[in-house]
Image (cartoon, grey):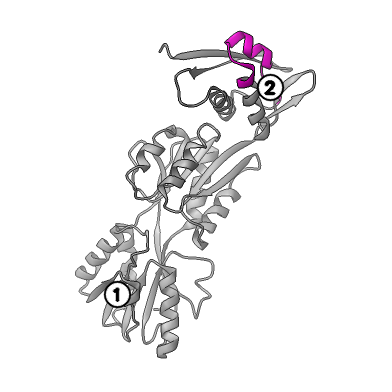
Amino acid sequence: MDNYKYLYLQTRTEQNGFMSINFSINIDSEVPKYQQLVNAINNELANNKLTSGDALPSVNYMCTTYQLSRDTVFKSYSILKEQGVVQSVPNKGYYIANNTRKVLLVLDTFKAYKEVVYHSFVGNLPDNIITDVQFHHYNIDNFKTILNNSKGKYYKYVVMTFNHDDVPLVISDIDDEKLLLIDWSIHSNSSNNYVFQDFGKAFFEALKPANKVFRKYKKLVFLYPTFTYHPEETVVYFRKYCGLFHFDYEIITNPKAFKVEKDVAYISTSDRMLGQFLEQCKTENLEPGVDVGFLSYNETPTKKFIYKGISVISTDFEALGTKAAEFVTQNKPMQYYVPTKLIIRDSL
């Protein structure tokens, strides 16, 4: 423990006199001391140990009492001012500006259904919680940069992970009580908070009500193009479904090999493939829902209006955002699977 220097900060409020706040600075850490001080004050604010109007120790007091350089303390306070956490009053010092909390929302890509998650999430947060949203685009370097640069700056972290071996190490630096994993269970463990959808068994169960509709077609084809990041367990359960209910089936991974056939129903994880399907139907004079069928993964606000309505199998993205917001506001453990549902429209 010799590499830790423990600081006991006294803050002042007009109502309550003096109160003590303590935190530690690791003098051997790779994280600069100024950033450790920023992180510590943000953490105290997040844990309600600091509140609007509380006075922070002066720069001179911090320097002389805790052997920190003036540049270190001043830089810390300046960063907190830029973040809107602290305000300075001439001849009086530094004060906590307000009770605003900042939350980091990390998504994979910006798609229509991710927009539903985002708006549901921020729409269920109180006005004093501000959301920063960033996208990793399935790039591990982006993911590392986003999370490493965010350490200690946020009240809560809501993160959509992906399948890469380095992900567990990156998220391990965030305290479990501050971290919520969303969408996919990849790289999660029993101690994590999460709001997930089930890409396997729940997908299988949601397909069952479509049995009678699928009987109209001679074969089921799963479009799982190589460019998709959709979990492969969905393909595994598609095979189980076809085997149990005796459907002839095929799995197409090469998008260039896709050619619409009459009397075939298609299930697709990609909206790009949905576009190809509709274009080919137009060219071949095939009527969706009559000559061919299509079931799309992931509901979006527009799919019920495309053509005569595209059938979907989807989790409830609005509920996913709502439950994530609940984790932020209620400060309770969260482990929840959002149900998967089937919506049959004219495309089947």
User: What's the amino acid at mark 2?
Assistant: Asp
Image quarter for residue 282?
bottom left
Mark 1 — residue? Answer: 221
Local secondary structure at mark 1: strand
Q: Residues within 10 Å of mark 1 (few under 14, many from 20)?
A: some
Report helix, strand or loop for mark 2. Answer: loop
Question: Which residue is under mark 2?
Answer: 54
Is residue 63 shown in magenta? yes
Q: CA distance from mark 2 to mark 1?
A: 63 Å
- Rendered location of residue 30, percent (x, y): 46, 26
At x 40% / y 73%, what residue is drawn? 273
Quadrant for residue 17, please give it: top right
Residue 202: horizontal and vertical position, in percent?
33, 58
Residue 288: image x %, image y %?
41, 83
Q: Looking at the image, which residue sits at the far bottom?
A: 285
* Amino acid type of the residue tagged 1 in the rendering: Val
| Range of residues picked out in magenta | 53-72
Q: Which of these two is toward me, 124 or 159?
A: 159
Name the residue at 49% across, 40% down. Answer: 157
Does residue 331 sit above or below 116 in this rendering? Answer: above
Quick check: is 92 in the magenta stretch?
no
Q: Is residue 130 above or below residue 20?
A: below
- The dot on residue 247 is none
In this orientation, does residue 347 appear? no
Seen from the viewer's position, the closer of residues 2 and 267 is: 2
